[in-house]
Image (cartoon, rainbow, N blue to C red):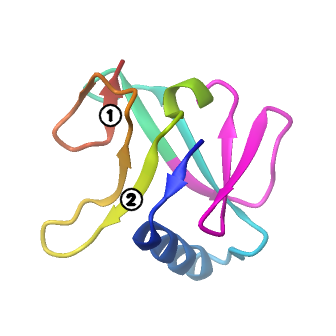
Amino acid sequence: MIKVSDQARDKAFQLMKEDGFDPAKDYIRVGVKSGGCSGLEYVLKFDKEKTESDQVFEDNNLKILVDKKSILYLAGTTLEYSGGLNGKGFVFNNPNAARTCGCGESFSL
């Protein structure tokens, strides 16, 4: 479903620990909502609880929650992390996106 690069996993683990989350049992929530300059934008946050409308995936030892409405938009996506001087932070490489904005935080189909 969603792949996670080594760099994204390492950064997610670091940020989870800093925010009081336990990467061994807590989740990173990935989703899509209306907005952004291209029509849809990505949602990324940490969560301790799963809801009935969530699907749970695991890749590279990172537990991922995706709500049912976002699954079709995110199928095949790879979550990456780009650091350094020109780094953008977390980056979604989404094969379903027909167009993305310059900042990489929103897309359209």
Q: Residues within 10 Å of mark 1 (few under 14, many from 20)?
A: many
**Three-letter code, disc 1:** Ser
Splitting the image into 4 quarters, where does residue 26 fall?
A: bottom right
Picture coordinates of residue 13 (x, y %)? Answer: 56, 76
Horizontal side of 63 relative to 3 (left or right) equals right
- Cα separation between marks 2 and 1: 15 Å
Dots 2, 1 in contact, CB < 8 A? no
**Residue 35 locus on image (x, y percent):** 38, 26
The residue range painted magenta reads 44-70
Mark 2, mark 1: which one is toward the viewer?
Answer: 2
Q: Residue at x 75, y 75 (%)?
A: 24
Which quadrant of the figure contains the C terminus?
top left
Residue 45 painted magenta: yes
Helix or strand or loop: what does disc 2 sit on?
strand
Q: Is residue 57 above or below residue 48?
A: above
Q: Which residue is mark 1?
A: 106
Who's the residue at 44% across and 49% down the image?
78
Point 59% across, 67% down: residue? 60
Q: Return the residue at label 2.
A: 80
- The residue sitting at 79% across, 70% down in the picture is 25
Total tally of numbered discs in the picture: 2
The amino acid at mark 2 is: Glu
